[in-house]
Image (cartoon, grey):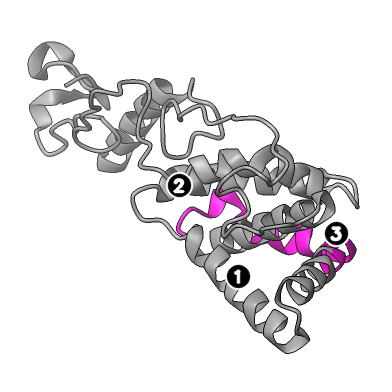
């Protein structure tokens, strides 16, 4: 009987939250972070600035930034398996291997040119890569970052080969914005959660509240609303 009572409560909980979008693992209403296409010349879009970089070099840098960000997400967002952060990252690395290889080669040439020395250029490229990774590490914005990265990672799986850089130009600004401390947008002033998933748990151990497996509202009050 106790198990049937739990099932009843879970069914009620599904009714409450069934209208939430499937992508809303963390928020009833996520922040709208869509922010438009960039070239890479905008401040902060390539991580550390790349003075004198050509349009092709900036595009390569954006592609490498997006790859790094989704790699960070694959490592940091495994606490929510339904995001598929690891699976999508592994797929995009395979599907876009040629473009990612070429993007790295473009960056190598940029750093060689910028530092007039192949050895020094490689050292600075390594530092650049490390700074990119650290730039996508977040604590306060982990939920919004993981959710945004999951959506972009999903799209990356379906982008045609050779178009990963275009995806980076379209979505990197949104991804960087997600690193901020975004919270619930349905009630921005504060969303108070009570009990399990906002549900006030009924008195399972009180037999007077139950009759033939049915909760008695008249005797014990509303089942789900606090």
* Residue on which disc 3 sits: 95
Q: Is residue 109 above or below residue 5?
A: below
Q: CA distance from mark 2 to mark 1?
A: 19 Å
Is residue 87 found inside the magenta-colored segment of the image? yes
Q: Nearer the viewer, mark 2 or mark 3?
A: 2
* Residue on which disc 2 sits: 179
User: Does residue 27 appear to the left or right of 132 in the view shown?
Assistant: left
Are the residues at dot 3 and dot 1 in contact (C-beta closer than 8 Å)? no
User: Does residue 206 appear to the left or right of 193 in the view shown?
Assistant: left
Q: Position of residue 26 (x, y in %)?
A: 42, 39
The one of 219 and 10 positioned closer to us in this rendering: 10
Mark 3 secondary-structure assignment = helix
Boundaries of the magenta span: 78-102
Mark 2 crowdedness (10 Å alpha carbons): few <14, some 14-19, many ≥20: many
Is residue 185 found inside the magenta-colored segment of the image? no
Earlier residue among tags 3 and 1: 3
**Residue at position x 57%, y 60% in the image:** 48
Picture disc at residue 128:
1
Q: Nearer the viewer, mark 3 or mark 1?
A: 1
Q: Is residue 6 above or below residue 164?
A: above
Q: Is residue 4 above or below residue 62?
A: above
**Residue at position x 9%, y 33% in the image:** 206
């Amino acid at each position: 009987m106790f198990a049937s009572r739990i099932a009843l409560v879970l069914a009620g909980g599904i009714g409450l939250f069934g209208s939430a979008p499937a992508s809303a693992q963390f928020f009833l209403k996520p922040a709208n972070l869509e922010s438009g296409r960039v070239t890479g010349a905008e401040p902060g879009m390539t991580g550390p600035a790349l003075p004198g970089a050509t349009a092709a070099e900036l595009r390569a840098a954006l592609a490498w930034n997006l790859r790094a960000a989704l790699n960070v997400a694959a490592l940091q967002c495994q606490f929510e398996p339904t995001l598929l952060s690891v699976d999508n990252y592994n797929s995009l690395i395979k599907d876009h291997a040629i473009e990612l290889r070429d993007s790295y080669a473009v960056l190598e040439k940029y750093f060689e040119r910028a530092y007039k020395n192949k050895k020094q250029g490689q050292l600075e490229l390594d530092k650049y890569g490390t700074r990119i990774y650290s730039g996508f590490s977040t604590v306060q914005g982990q939920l919004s970052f993981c959710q945004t990265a999951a959506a972009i990672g999903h799209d990356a799986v379906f982008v045609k080969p050779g178009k990963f850089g275009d995806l980076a130009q379209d979505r990197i600004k949104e991804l960087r914005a997600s690193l901020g401390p975004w919270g619930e947008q349905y009630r921005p002033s504060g969303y108070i959660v009570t009990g399990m998933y906002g549900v006030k748990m009924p008195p399972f151990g009180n037999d007077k509240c139950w009759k033939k497996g049915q909760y008695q509202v008249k005797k014990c009050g509303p089942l789900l609303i606090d």
